[in-house]
Image (cartoon, grey):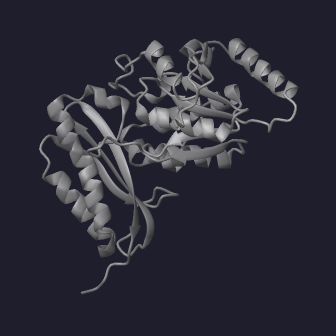
Amino acid sequence: MSTEPAQRTPLVVRTREELRDEQMRWALAGSLEAGDEPGRRAVVMTMGALHEGHLELVRRARAEAGPAGQVVVTIFVNPLQFGAGEDLEKYPRDLDGDVAKLAEVGADVVFAPTPDVVYPDGDPVVRVSAGRIGEVLEGASRPGHLDGVLTVVLKLMHLVRPDVALFGEKDAQQLLAVRRMVRDLEVSVEVVGVPTVREADGLALSSRNAYLSPEERERALALSRALRAGAAAADRGAAGVINDAREVLDGADGVVVDYLALVDPVTVDAVTDDFSGPALLLVAARVGSTRLIDNQAVEVSPEVQR
């Protein structure tokens, strides 16, 4: 028997008023259904161009919300998180196609605002700062990116008013920044991370994979190979993890590494050579003109002296 929810076309709303009206309608309907367990509102925030990774987030959101709950998917290409020369204008957009996919995985509402709805006064004067988390790795490569992410995430949390928000673990630094923001700013939302969805050959799903030519896609597999090689070397300590992952990347044609780092999964601080315990191995690289990121959890053993 299929575990997929019954297919239904989600309601598409584009304004704050339409979103608020739907929230009130759902709350009223829930109050009239005596005997049901109270449902939760779950949100999945996306920039559209949905792939199986996004859909897995929505499936998890459906489970978190419960049968009487509400699943909201936001589709908004956030200009604040794009830097100079990045792909804001060419970022893939296909709202009709996205809605059709969401109908198959249990989404109830799609909130697809334009920038003037999210930022009615233009670029916001007051923004959320990712602090030290936003200054390293992705933050160093894309200055201001995580500030833009956190600003729109907080705004959407206020607008959607979810009980739980789901984010993919592929964007590990983003997930950590969101969790820290929710904790530091006392936001009453449960943040749930969902494991990375991969193709059969190991490539992490990403909307940017659409930019890869067949040859570039083959070269991009070096990222996941490097992560696996690093994880396999965990019994040789932190240096062994980095060395084996680096060896794979150094031998990959057409892959320009931005960073490769083994970090504490809570602080994003680089671990020392004598570190042992859970860590995250992170990589970012360009394949052709496409920038890709990936990561792998690693349980590092103390290096054995020989």
Asked whether, in this view, residue 37 is left or right of residue 275, the answer is right
Residue 106, given in percent of the width and then of the height, sits at 58, 28
The residue under the point 42% across, 27% down is: 82
| Number of numbered discs | 0
Relative vertical location of residue 241 with respect to residue 47 in this rendering, above or below: below
Task: Point out the image quarter for the C terminus.
Answer: bottom left
With respect to residue 274, does 53 lie above or below?
above
Q: Position of residue 111 (x, y in %)?
A: 60, 19
Vertically, is 290 above or below 13? below
- For the residue pair 104 and 257, the one nearer the viewer reads as 104
Residue 263 as seen in the image, left or right of residue 162:
left
Name the residue rendered at 62%, 32% in the picture.
43
- Using the rendered view, name the quadrant where residue 247 is placed: bottom left
Question: Is residue 271 visible in this depiction of the protein?
Answer: no
Of all residues, the one furthest to the bottom in this rendering is 306
Examine the rendered structure and indicate whether residue 188 appears above or below residue 116: below
**Residue 148, percent across and down?**
51, 32
Q: Residue furthest front?
A: 1
Task: Please give the name of the residue rendered at 57% of the width and 29% of the height, measured from the top-left corner.
Answer: 152
Residue 236 appears in which quarter of the rendering?
Answer: bottom left
Question: Residue 170: image x %, image y %?
Answer: 42, 44
Q: Is residue 136 visible?
A: yes
